[in-house]
Structures are given as structure tokens and as C-alpha cells.
Image (cartoon, rainbow, N blue to C red):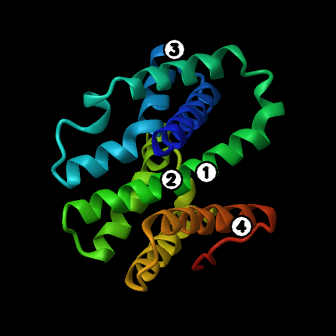
Amino acid sequence: MFFFLDSIGTFVFAISGALAAMNKRLDPFGIFIIAFVTALGGGTLRDVLIGHTPVGWMENLDYVYIVIVGTLFAIFFRRKIDYLRKSLFLFDTIGLGVFTIIGIEKGIATDLHPIISVAIGTMSASFGGVIRDILCNEIPVIFRKEVYATACIVGGVFYFTMLWLGFPSQLIYVLTATIVIGIRLLAVKYSLRLPTIQ
């Protein structure tokens, strides 16, 4: 189930990166690179930081194939993707929740402190988008207006709270993902954002 949701998240993040690259009028190679770092950049950074090398996509080429398919999908259906934006946003949000949990789990498996594990989970979920925006010469969205990384952090704190209280792991996964997804959906629906400092 995790691999299935992880694959969906990777696919949608790849589409997100490809669309951002096409908006910048990059060539096909540039589009693929932006799609690749958007989909796999967060996980790559996570694996490097915890010393898990070769990183995940090098050990399992399925992720590379998913990025290729996502890139081609974005290129060939770019004019129709507007009709799919709500669905893509939903899958993107699900991917956010799943990637947060996967990152936290990898932090725990490496015997990292809970605070560091939450940071690792947040990086896994959101830093592909940070790299995408930097390469596209934009201020990363999560630093400007979106409640994105904040949802991951809250979900991570909730995860460890449930773990400390002794809840079963499967329930923790479901509830943590629900918290992250719920915060993200509510933030977008009601235009919630963190205040800026003038």
C-alpha cells in the first residue's frame, strides 16, 4: 500500500515539476530534469542525510520509470490537465502525507531523535518542490505563502505523540496521513497561510 501511494505521489510530483518547467519554456531535457528533482529530490536528500546510499531511486528503477511516464503525461496532455487539477492536487496532497510518514519511519530506523525524524519527514515531502522552484528561479512556494511544510511538521508531532501513547503503527500511519492531508486541504480551501514579517 505504501509503495502504491508512494508511486502515485511520485507520479503527480513529476507532473507538477514538468508543468513548472514548461511554464518556463524549458527544452524536453530541462523538463525531465525539473520533473525528476521535484518527484525524487526530497527522498534523495533524505537518504543522503541518513547515510542510506545508494539512494532509493538508484536501487529501484521503478521510480525513474514513474517520473518518465509522469513527464510524458504532462507534455502530451498539458492542454487538458487544467481539467484534472483538482484530482492532481488531491494526489499531490496524499503524496505529501505518505512521504512525511516514510521519512519519519526512515529516521526512526536510523535511531534519530524524534525532532530530527520529523525534520527528515518534512524534507522528504516538501524539498523536491523547493529544489524545483530554485532551479526555475523562483522563491520556493513553501517559504512564501503555502501551508505545506507546516502540515508535515504538525503531522510529525502527532505521529510521535501517538507512538508515545502506544497506539498501533497502522492506526498511527492512517491518522498521521489524515492530519497532514486535512491541514493541507483546509489551508487551500480557506486560503490560510502563515503571517509574513514586514
Which residue is under mark 4?
187
Which residue is under mark 2?
98
Which residue is under mark 1?
94
Mark pair 3, 2: CA separation: 29 Å
Q: Name the residue: 40% across, 77% down.
A: 163
Q: Which amino acid lies under the numbered mark 3 shown in the image of this protein?
A: Pro
Q: In terms of sequence position, does the residue under pointer 4 or pointer 1 come before the other?
A: 1
Q: Name the residue: 40% across, 24% down.
A: 62
For residue 20, what is the image quadrant?
top right
Mark pair 3, 4: CA separation: 33 Å
Q: In terms of sequence position, does the residue under pointer 1 or pointer 3 come before the other?
A: 3
Under circle 1, the secondary element is: helix
Q: In terms of sequence position, does the residue under pointer 3 or pointer 2 come before the other?
A: 3
Under circle 4, the secondary element is: helix
Q: Position of residue 5 (x, y in %)?
A: 54, 42
Mark pair 4, 1: CA separation: 15 Å
Mark pair 1, 3: CA separation: 28 Å
Q: Which amino acid lies under the numbered mark 1 shown in the image of this protein?
A: Ile
| Residues tagged 4 and 1 counted as in contact (Cβ below 8 A) | no
